[in-house]
Image (tube, rainbow, N blue to C red):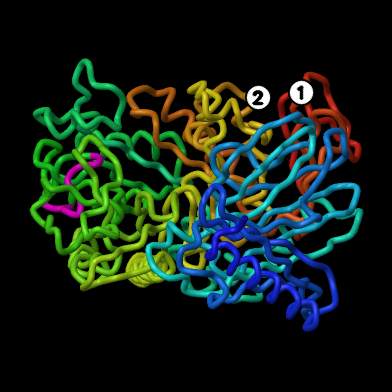
Amino acid sequence: MMKGNTMFRFFLGLYFTLVCSVLYATESISADFVFSDTDIITKNYQLENMSDGAMRLTIPVADIPRNTRQVRIYSSFFEAEKGDEGYFIIPNVRYGNIGYFKHENGRKFYDPQLAFIGSKTPKGAYVAIVKGLELEFSVIMEVKNKHHILYPRFNINKIDFDPYEDIVIDYYNLGKNATYVDMAKKYRQYKIDSGAIVSLKERVKTNPILKYSVEAPFIRVKLANNKHPKGMDGYNSPKWDKVKHELNIMNTFDDFINIMKNMHNAGVKEADMCFVGWQVGGFDGYFPDLFPVEERLGGEAKMREAVKVGKELGYHMTTHINNHNMYKRAKRWSDEFVSKNRKGEPRVYTYWPGGKAYNTCFQTICDRFIDSDIAKLKDMGMNAPQHVDVTTARRPDPCCDAIHPNNREQQAQHQIRLGKKYRKHFGGFTSEAGYDHCIEVLDYALYTSSVYAGLVDNLHTDKISLTERDLFPIWQIVYHGYVLSNPDWYTIDCYLKPKGHQWRLKFIECGGRPTFYWTQYKSQKDIDAIAEAYREYVPMRHLQYETIERHQEIAKGIILVGYSNGSEVVVNYSDKPYEYKGKVIQPRDYLLF
């Protein structure tokens, strides 16, 4: 027998279903409103036909009861059986972007990097683009008794506020012959039509700093961080708040100068040079404090000298900073400035070498700190796009502070405010991982995948993924030609690997911008790797202004990438030569046509 509250919800759902069936007469979608593990009601929604060919699901805010935990959206477009031909597309950073129908049972949660999912099944090819409440959903792939289903789950109880906009999902039938490329291009067109992105080709016409960045490698030199004491378990340990912090110096500002001179002597004539760990306390030091410049590296005077030398060599100069974290050790720390949870307590992010890290409220960063920081960085001579840690590596957290309350969407708007300031003063804004909630101000992503890191680290969480643990360039098909990127955590420094290494080939396949970071630049081998990457990039860099229109395996181990200007790059991952258009691509190599 149903309890009174459950019975009320049952009849409410029945009434709503009947009303919707009168209003619309097309495909239907089911939505589970989850109140607890045992208290779930299901509503059926008719999809509305839109002028652009979409079939639209709308769940108004008013239809989401306040005590809703989750809303799960199910569609037959995103179902398949084991052995069916096709795949699911799930844009995410960690686990790989494509999943095949080969599993018996399993369930996996994916944090969406981009606000769409795709399916190619015997029913056809479909893409679902989340256009309302898009910062509040996760993607679930579930397999029960060989039946595969992919669905978005809106985490209503994690919003920390009432839902602030309708749930809106547009479903597109792309036809049986469509592929993942068409899914990514449909999402790209949505971003273009919404005004979120403008091509690099267009933007460099009035932005010489961005043009330089498009055509130059990104060289990040780590200077100092906190020493890792013996017995410390990893880098996310509460012990960081209890140990005496000692600085580990990897490079001084004099070393930075020598690195630049060695690069220039090796033939690297263009580079965005980035100081990392330059500020007080070194890398992951005591944000939001940036100044004074760390004296043990040479202090501000020596850093200014390094900037001057870099510019004389023809390089552009920038710094690595962080707007996301705040530490109690910082002089600018205040409970008033950090993000708060529902209880009004400072929202804890994690433990880093700087100690316990708290989430900043991006409104307070915008309003109180950033203008003075920008003025100081400009005074020191910085003239390349500003690199800001974390911002696009995860969705923003809400802030429940009574003085500066911001839901997730409002926090994202403050991040966009920050990006606009960096673009105005430094010609660009760069960050990591490429989550696209502030894609309209992002100019470069340090990496867009970390799937290889999971394989190298042999992480257990990666082993249970239902997606293929390989880098599939969905992000690049969407954004290449609009936003620069390096494709993976481990395609950073990939030119330190021998010619033909998988990471180097994947870097080429994804149209990456050469990026160096993990090395300490202590040997001539490091400098030679940068020079080799630069030499190979110069004949390819014009492709950064083009979109990727084709991506397919044309033979076993042979990948063809087609660009909007008609150029083609063929990558040979196999151990045998391959002939294409009268030319031979050697094993573990590539050619530009």
- The image shows residue 77 at horizontal and vertical percentages of 80, 55
Q: Is residue 289 magenta?
A: yes
Task: Give the total number of marks visible in the rendering.
Answer: 2
**Which of disc 2 and disc 1 is earlier in sequence?**
2
Residue drawn where x is 78% and y is 71% of the image: 55
Choose between 519 and 282: the one closer to the eye.
Answer: 282
Crowdedness near tag 2: few (<14), some (14–19) or many (≥20) residues, C-alpha within 10 Å: some
* Magenta segment boundaries in residue numbering: 283-291
User: Does the CB distance between marks 1 and 2 fall below 8 Å?
Assistant: yes
Residue, disc 1: 587
Q: Which mark is residue 500?
A: 2
Choose between 18 and 28: the one closer to the eye.
Answer: 18
Rendered image quadrant of residue 99? top right
Q: Secondary structure at mark 1?
A: loop
Report whether residue 201 is seen: no
The quadrant in which the C terminus is found is top right
Crowdedness near tag 1: few (<14), some (14–19) or many (≥20) residues, C-alpha within 10 Å: some
The quadrant in which the N terminus is found is bottom right
The amino acid at mark 1 is Pro
Position of 297 relative to 333 (above/below): above
* Secondary structure predominantly adopted by residues drawn in magenta: loop
